[in-house]
Amino acid sequence: MELSIVIPIYNVEAYIGRCLDSVSKIFDLGLACEVIIVNDGTPDGSMAIVEDYAKKYPHIKIINQDNQGLGEARNVGLRHACGEYVYFLDSDDTIKAENLVTLFRSGYNSLPDVLVGNYSNIVEGENRHYLPAIIEEQSRVYTGEDYFNRYYVKSINILVVQGIYKKSFLLDNNLFFTKGIFFEDVNWMPKMLLHANAIYYKNICIYNYYLRQGSIIRSEYTLKKFHDILFIAEDLLKLSSKKLRRKTQKNIGYLAIVGTSVSIGRILKDNSLTVSDRKSIDRIFGWDTCHYFYIHIYLWFYKAFPVWVQKVLKSKYSN
């Protein structure tokens, strides 16, 4: 088995049909492939649709579990995968099957830990789509650390769904998704990149990412999401204990501090920071490896005039 496609299912009755239509095209392209559907306790009619597709396509396997969240559903799929490589697909989006196979076949001989392509943003209800910035025009192999410093730090919108991952690479490095948090991709991607020895990149669009109201990243910003960002920032800083270049360590700090700063502004719109929140923020802001000049200026203002900075942030995000 060459490839396992893992698709978690939860409340996607309106979208799962188009997702599986796009996936089914891969079965005619000569790639030894399986599709693992993880029913994450969905309460709607999604699984009735999935079962109809499973009757038609024997490549589709179904795993049922109680609701545990997107991250754990992906983990379950990974543990059950038989493919040499694994691809994580969100059930409300679609793939470009021919391009996905082209990426896999063109990069496979490089024996990479990860094969990476591009994606297209599609704004539902507005009949428009656009491509994010192209990383490179030509195909190329990077180390994970180089890819992190060159591209991930500059564009947090590099997504899990852009990559096809070698299963043994994920398992050997214990690269599972954190259970029960929002923004699990933001938590997982830096860890994955900084463990990877070889990343094969090809300028080809493999994924259609649908932007719609109600998606996790576009929905209301809650205290749970704020606390998850603080957890992710502190978890990210733990990577600095690895043997990494100084530049990489500084970029880790940059991501943690900027992410936390933006989150403070968003949460102050309707909430106040607790003592525990402030302690967590102080630990993040007190990290001494990140010393970009403008970050230092921001930190000085935050420490010297915390109330004023919070008022500025609250004013910025209160409209």
Image (spheres, rainbow, N blue to C red):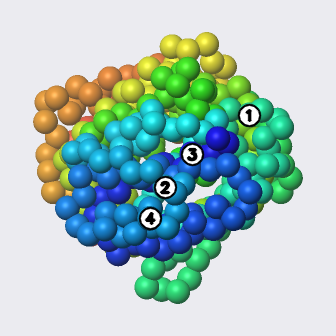
User: Of marks 1 and 3, which one's residue comes earlier in the chain?
Assistant: 3
User: Of marks 2 and 3, which one's residue comes earlier in the chain?
Assistant: 3
Badge 3 is on which residue? 4
Q: Is residue 139 above or below residue 249?
A: below
Badge 1 is on which residue? 112
Whether tag 4 and tag 1 are in contact, CB under 8 A, the answer is no
Look at label 2 and name its amino acid.
Answer: Ile
- The image position of residue 275, as x and y in percent, is 13, 30
- Name the front one of labels 2 and 3: 2
Look at label 4 and name its amino acid.
Answer: Lys
Look at label 3 and name its amino acid.
Answer: Ser
Badge 4 is on which residue? 55
How far is the residue under mark 2 from the one under mark 4?
Answer: 8 Å
User: Of marks 4 and 3, which one's residue comes earlier in the chain?
Assistant: 3
Q: Is residue 6 above or below residue 179?
A: below
In percent of the image, x 49 and y 28: which residue is there? 175
Q: Quadrant of the C terminus?
A: bottom left
Horizontal relation, residue 158 to residue 217: left or right: right
